[in-house]
């Protein structure tokens, strides 16, 4: 226990001079460090002293010329809110003294029935009780301030009846009910009816686990009928001698809406990627069909005709067979060409740069287009095979676009590193196109889809008559990156 103030100033409110002298002598005889002892014969005098002097303890006679009974204490306590008060009573006033104790007085002494030892003990205990009471009051005020001024809705409800016992300003503002309307309702009234049983189970389970903090997302109803999603953090407490639950609500409606939109956007993007892949497959099948029908099939048809004729015409047999061999060789080359465009290149075996150079040579042999390849010391060994394959397919796709649509005579391919990105640029001097118009082909869509699989970016700059520049930035692979192209 802490000791009383070593310099204790005491106010004695007593209209009987004899009783005051006896009390003063008893105070001076104690081991307490007594400072000044103020004397007031009237309640009004006591109030005046309290307003001007540093008083640490008050002795109060309940019967004064200008006040009597419990009224004496209630009038004095307003001016001595943080000062301990010990009542001085006669044998017949103990009931009034007990009533004053219930109102906040610290102790009472019966005149003529105490000595110095009992007096000192009463003073020490009264000061300690008052100090503890004030600390508790200060603590409650701080917690109440935190509760009321919290920017998030908070409330306390009875764990058995679900009645609201307390709500803060944020709850009143957010839900639209007045403070009085809240206290007249239960926690069930702001929940959808179908959640009532779940809430009862949660509260019952929480009570069994005592003061455990629980979290969860619930639907709530505002006064205007709006349905919101809130993340509730709740804690079991005792409030006004009741088992209660303290809850804090965080409105996550907007967060859930954005997450739903993001999820739907991802689904849409995945559908678009799937559609692009399907269209690319169908296009490739169509191209293969055309190549087989228009080239290989016609070559083999002519070869079959020559061989049949050679079998019946001895004079032309040698020439026809030689021509048939030539046609068969052409068919083999056409099939090899088709196969080469379809089979995944051996990136790991021959490398990306060599694979790109091979496809450039094939394009050059097929026409008169000039292609320049600037690899600028590209660190191929530090790039993973998945990104190498993606780069190769993008170049292959864009060269096909240029051949079919651009009518270009010159193409520049530049491959290098820009910061943390692999940068690929494919530019041509062809006829260009309006980038704002819808494109019927799937070539550019395939390039964009492949790039987005690695969270990359595609930039297309073109206009009619000004050629086209395709720029692709692919992030360099990070640790643990297992994304497949």
Image: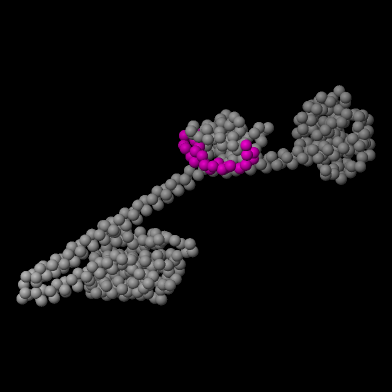
Q: Which residue corresponds to the image point at 36% horizontal and 61% vertical from the top-left?
A: 450
The answer to whether residue 41 is visible is: no
Q: How is the image coloured?
A: one colour
Q: Quadrant of residue 474?
A: bottom left
Q: Which residue corresponds to the image point at 33% horizontal and 72% vertical from the top-left?
A: 356
- Please tell me which residue lies in front, 155 or 69: 155
Left or right: 51 as drawn, with respect to 241: right
Q: Position of residue 469 (x, y in %)?
A: 32, 67
Q: Quadrant of the C terminus?
A: bottom left
- Please tell me which residue lies in front, 297 or 265: 297
Q: Position of residue 237 (x, y in %)?
A: 65, 38
Q: Quadrant of residue 387?
A: bottom left
Q: Which residue corresponds to the image point at 48% horizontal and 47% vertical from the top-left?
A: 255
Q: Is residue 428 above or below residue 160?
A: below
Asked if residue 253 is among those painted magenta in the image, a careful observer would answer no
Q: Is residue 229 above or below residue 451?
A: above
Q: Is residue 33 above or below residue 436?
A: above
- Number of numbered discs overlaid on the protein picture: 0
Q: Quadrant of the N terminus?
A: top right
Left or right: 254 as drawn, with respect to 336: right
Q: Quadrant of residue 132?
A: top right
Q: Position of residue 293 (x, y in %)?
A: 18, 63
Report the span colored magenta: 208-233
Q: Residue furthest top?
A: 92
Q: Position of residue 65 (x, y in %)?
A: 85, 26
- Please tell me which residue lies in front, 47 or 306: 306
Q: Which residue corresponds to the image point at 39% horizontal and 59% vertical from the top-left?
A: 453
Left or right: 232 as drawn, with respect to 79: left
Asked if residue 209 is among those painted magenta in the image, a careful observer would answer yes
The answer to whether residue 205 is visible is: yes
């Amino acid at each position: 226990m802490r000791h009383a103030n070593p310099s204790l100033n005491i106010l004695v409110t007593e209209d009987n001079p004899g009783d005051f002298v006896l009390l003063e002598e008893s105070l001076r005889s104690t081991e307490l460090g007594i400072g000044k002892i103020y004397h007031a014969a009237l309640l009004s005098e006591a109030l005046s002293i309290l307003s001007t002097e540093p008083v640490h303890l008050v002795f109060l006679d309940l019967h004064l010329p200008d006040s009597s009974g419990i009224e004496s204490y209630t009038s004095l306590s307003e001016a001595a809110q943080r000062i301990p008060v010990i009542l001085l009573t006669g044998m017949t006033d103990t009931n009034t003294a007990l009533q004053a104790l219930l109102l906040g007085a610290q102790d009472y002494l019966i005149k003529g029935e105490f000595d110095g030892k009992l007096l000192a003990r009463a003073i020490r205990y009264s000061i300690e009780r008052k100090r503890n009471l004030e600390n508790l009051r200060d603590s409650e005020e701080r917690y109440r301030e935190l509760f009321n001024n919290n920017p998030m809705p908070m409330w306390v409800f009875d764990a058995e009846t679900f009645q609201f016992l307390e709500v803060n300003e944020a709850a009143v503002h957010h839900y639209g009910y007045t403070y009085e309307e809240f206290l007249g309702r239960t926690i069930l009234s702001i929940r959808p009816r179908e959640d009532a049983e779940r809430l009862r189970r949660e509260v019952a389970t929480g009570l069994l686990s005592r003061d455990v903090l629980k979290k969860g997302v619930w639907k709530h109803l505002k006064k205007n009928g709006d349905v919101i999603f809130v993340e509730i953090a709740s804690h079991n407490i005792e409030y006004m001698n009741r088992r209660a639950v303290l809850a804090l609500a965080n409105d996550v409606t907007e967060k859930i809406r954005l997450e739903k939109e993001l999820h739907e956007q991802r689904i849409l993007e995945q559908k678009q990627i799937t559609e692009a892949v399907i269209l690319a497959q169908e296009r490739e099948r169509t191209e293969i069909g055309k190549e087989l029908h228009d080239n290989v099939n016609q070559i083999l048809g002519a070869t079959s005709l020559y061989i049949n004729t050679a079998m019946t015409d001895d004079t032309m047999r040698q020439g026809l067979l030689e021509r048939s061999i030539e046609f068969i060789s052409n068919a083999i080359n056409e099939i090899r060409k088709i196969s080469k465009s379809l089979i995944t290149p051996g990136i790991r075996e021959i490398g990306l740069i060599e694979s790109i150079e091979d496809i450039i040579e094939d394009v050059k042999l097929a026409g008169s287009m000039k292609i320049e390849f600037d690899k600028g010391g590209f660190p191929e060994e530090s790039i993973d095979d998945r990104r190498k394959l993606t780069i190769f397919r993008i170049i292959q796709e864009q060269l096909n676009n240029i051949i079919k649509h651009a009518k270009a005579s010159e193409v520049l391919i530049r491959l290098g590193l820009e910061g943390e990105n692999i940068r690929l640029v494919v530019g041509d001097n062809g006829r260009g196109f309006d980038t704002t118009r819808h494109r019927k082909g799937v070539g550019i869509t395939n390039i964009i889809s492949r790039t987005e699989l690695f969270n990359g970016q595609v930039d297309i700059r073109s206009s009619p008559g000004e050629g086209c520049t395709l720029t692709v930035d692919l992030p360099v692979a990070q640790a643990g990156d297992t994304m497949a192209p």
